[in-house]
Amino acid sequence: MDLIRDIINQLYERVLSFIQTSSPATLQLSGILGLALALIGYFQLRGGNAVPPARPPTLSRPERSQQTQSQPSSSKPESSISTVQNIRVTRDSPIARTVQSRLQGVRRVTISCPNVILQPGQILETAALHPEAAEIVKEMCYMRLEVYLISMVSDDIGEALISGALESEGVSSASTQFAEGMVPSHRVLFCSTLEGKVAIVRQLEPDLHVDSLDSTVEGLQRFIPALWQVVQSGNDTSVGSNAYKEGGATAANVQRGPSLSAFFGLQ
């Protein structure tokens, strides 16, 4: 404080001496400057004794995790809006219970339609389905399994006949959108050669493949976990007997049966 007073006194003496020796024009400007200096000194003098105002306390913002925890438990989590397609439907019917029990742990199935879903015969003017096989495929779809239907055809006419038969029986839909108990149209596949069918199945990597041809089973036996082969009448048709042997060793992942329904004990 004493230092500030000394500075103000020195300034005052200098200003006073300047006023006494200066011309009137200079005094007008000097008077303004002097008044400003006096005011500055006065406020500095008062400011030295003043107590600085207390700083208001700052409230820390709660962390994001705390805000999340403080939300009421009644709010719906995002997981509750999950897609319906990931939920398996429980249907109370003999065939539904059998299919669900037999296919526990299976997520993806590929089926070769000829002689499995489609009745034997040349696809020239019409394509007929096995009713029991069609119902089994529907139950697979109700379980939300990824079901792919594969057919080997020689032209567009055969493709159209098979697609029409599957849609008319309610096995597949004409849309790529999900439909209850139906195979979407983009999972109904066609090929023109046996090699093409084997390549499709290997690319899809199903848990189970169902076919009727020895050559297809032979080509897939080393790559697919489980293979079911529907054999023609007159062969060994007991379910569980092996269809293919490689190097004299029985293929444990291959089962045979007279029809698709036989694998579920429905025949």
Image: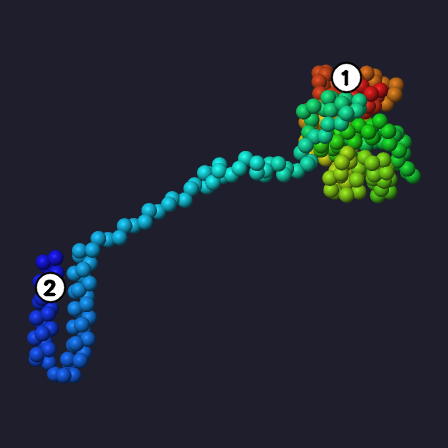
Q: Quadrant of residue 40?
A: bottom left
Quadrant holding the C terminus:
top right
Residue 258 at least partly seen = yes
- Residue at x-position 12% and y-position 83%: 23
Q: Earlier in the sequence, mark 1 or mark 2?
A: 2
Badge 1: few (under 14), some or many (20 or more) residues near its Cα, within 10 Å? some
Depth order, front residue of 172/42: 42
Give the Cα separation between the discs numbered 1 and 2.
Answer: 112 Å
Quadrant holding the N terminus:
bottom left
- Residue at x-position 77% and y-position 34%: 181
- Residue at x-position 80% and y-position 22%: 94
Q: Position of residue 144 (x, y in %)?
A: 71, 32
Q: Quadrant of residue 211?
A: top right
Query: Is 84 left or right of 30, judged from the image as shown?
Result: right
Badge 2: few (under 14), some or many (20 or more) residues near its Cα, within 10 Å? few
Depth order, front residue of 74/93: 74
Q: Position of residue 116 (x, y in %)?
A: 82, 28
Query: Is 76 left or right of 111, judged from the image as shown?
Result: left
Colour scheme employed for the rendering of this structure:
rainbow
Looking at the image, residue 11 lies above or below residue 255: below
Amino acid at the residue labelled 1:
Gly
Amino acid at the residue labelled 2:
Ile
**Which residue position is annotated with label 1?**
240
- Numbered disc total: 2
Residue 7 disc label: 2
Q: Quadrant of residue 182?
A: top right
Q: Position of residue 85 (x, y in %)?
A: 69, 36
Depth order, front residue of 144/263: 144
Residue 214 at least partly seen = no
Query: Among all residues in the image, which is located at the extreme right?
Result: 125
Depth order, front residue of 192/148: 148
